Image: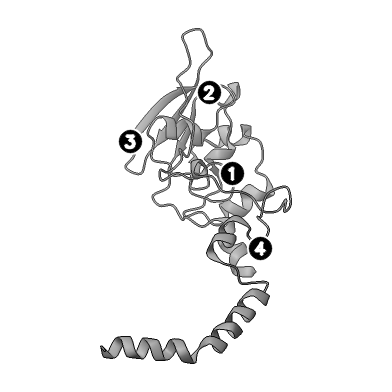
Amino acid sequence: MPVATSIFQRLCRQTPNNLRFGRKCFSSSPMVKSPRSTLHKPNLPLIGCKSYPHVQKLDKKNFTTTKSSSHVRLKAPGPDEESIHVTFIDKEGNEQRIAARKGENLLSIAQSNDVEMEGACEGSCSCSTCHVIVEDEEFFDKIPEATDEENDMLDLAFGLTETSRLGCQIELTKELDGLRVRLPSMTRNLQASDFSSKSS
């Protein structure tokens, strides 16, 4: 008789009590089920939005691997529309005169016309990367005063001057036709969230 067969038969003769004890423990445990019953009758309740409102189901279509657009590209005013002209002066001193509509802000105008203005916070007044320097004090005085939030962000701007403003906070009006703004030689990308995370 082969050795393996002999060992198997010996084990079968010695373990009937153990097998009965195992079946008893197996059947009495509420957490242990056979594979078939586990698949069809799960012990744990399924988590759903109705039972647990704070749990949200995740959908693959909610995820994307591409970066969302940071701004809406503005169209140039039509021939029958009133145009307001603003001139951007870049770091090298090159000037770009752009026709825009009333109510548009300098950040959106700059980004729509490939002017090098970052706008890291996408115009939410929580960074200083759209910092501009108004060339003419007369025009500067026509712009509504900066809010406390804008002044807080301007304190973080590189090369701050007395006529510094955030481009996202300057909306064009008829009185600002001919406005000239200079871009600083550098920008400092510090956002409000950087400080709130450090203080917490």
Q: Quadrant of residue 95?
A: top left
Q: CA distance from mark 1 to mark 4?
A: 49 Å
Between 45 and 8, the one lying in front of the other is 8
Q: Is residue 15 above or below residue 83?
A: below
**Which residue position is annotated with label 2?**
177
**Which residue position is annotated with label 3?**
94
Q: Amino acid at mark 2?
A: Asp
- Give the x, y percent position of residue 157: 51, 54
Q: Is residue 71 above or below residue 32?
A: above
Crowding near the residue tagged with mark 2, few <14, some 14–19, many ≥20 C-alpha atoms within 10 Å: some
Mark 1 lies on a secondary structure that is loop
- In the image, taking residue 65 as reference, residue 126 lies left or right, namely right
Q: Amino acid at mark 3?
A: Asn
- In the image, taking residue 14 as reference, residue 51 lies left or right, namely right
- Give the x, y percent position of residue 76: 45, 19
Residue at image point 44% right, 34% down: 110
**Which residue position is annotated with label 4?**
43
- In the image, taking residue 145 as reference, residue 138 lies left or right, namely left
Q: Nearer the viewer, mark 3 or mark 4?
A: 4
Mark 4 lies on a secondary structure that is loop
Q: CA distance from mark 3 to mark 4?
A: 71 Å
**Label whose residue precedes the other's in the sequence (2 or 4):** 4
Crowding near the residue tagged with mark 3, few <14, some 14–19, many ≥20 C-alpha atoms within 10 Å: few
